[in-house]
Amino acid sequence: MKTLSRRGQVILGIAAVILLTALSLVAVGVVGNLVNPGGSGFLSRARCAAPNLPGPVVSVSLTNMGGPMMGRRNGMMGGAMRMTADRSTVAHGTVSFLVTNAGTISHELAILPLPADQVPGTRPIGGDAKIDEAGSLGEASSTCAEGTGQGILPGASGWVTITLPPGRYELVCNLPGHYAAGMYTQLTVT
Ligand SMILES: [Cu+2]
């Protein structure tokens, strides 16, 4: 009787482990689907799930080569950091940005108006190794959350929803040195 109940406990324990494993697999599957609804693989490294974002969604990927030291050096010297968007034009009105950090150091996205005669990547760099963010329409710089924060950690996503009038815009990462290192791209709003 005593042996039987102990065996029963062992069986119960094994069943609990199997159940928990199954539940965690289901959870991973659900999160994976939320992060990557289209199954395109574009956001497959993201560790957090974005909500359903309103309006057309511009998916932005942030990358850098090498480790943190390499990133810092490149940030000062230029090159080796990139910002890419899955579209170069979007209709005016409500627009969402889903920003995924595919690099190895923190990054962010800010949306700045781009004057008609200005080429992306040519803003003057200040003494703090940053550009002037005056006129910014919004930013995604929070890990697994909307809006402004301390930066999007590697492998994670951030997002923001704003209202965009027609015009030219420059998407930038303005952590020190990152704009000079190549973290900018143009978005045209029609
Ligand atoms: Cu950056």
Image (cartoon, rainbow, N blue to C red):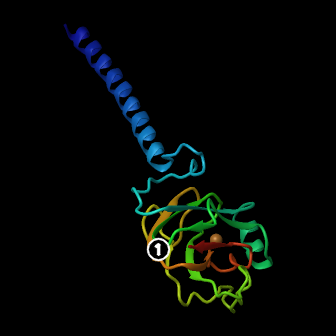
Can residue 148 be seen in this snapshot? no
Q: Secondary structure at mark 1?
A: loop
- Does 187 appear above or below 45? below
Query: Residue 130 location, x and y as percent?
Result: 65, 85
Query: Residue 105 location, x and y as percent?
Result: 63, 65
Query: Residue 37 location, x and y as percent?
Result: 48, 46
Farthest-out residue, front? 190
Nearer to me, 131 or 161: 161
Q: What number of labels is visible?
A: 1
Query: Residue 20 location, x and y as percent?
Result: 36, 32
Tell me what residue is drawn at x 57 percent, y 56 percent. 155
Nearer to me, 7 or 73: 73
Left-right relation of 156 to 173: left
- Does 129 appear above or below 91? below
Left-right relation of 49 to 153: left
Tell me what residue is drawn at x 37 percent, y 27 percent. 17
**Which quadrant of the rendered structure holds the N terminus?**
top left
Left-right relation of 118 to 132: right
Quadrant of the image occupied by residue 59: bottom right
Residue denoted by label 1: 149
Amino acid bearing label 1: Gly
Farthest-out residue, left? 1
Tell me what residue is drawn at x 72 percent, y 61 percent. 67
In which quadrant of this rendering is ligand 1 seen?
bottom right
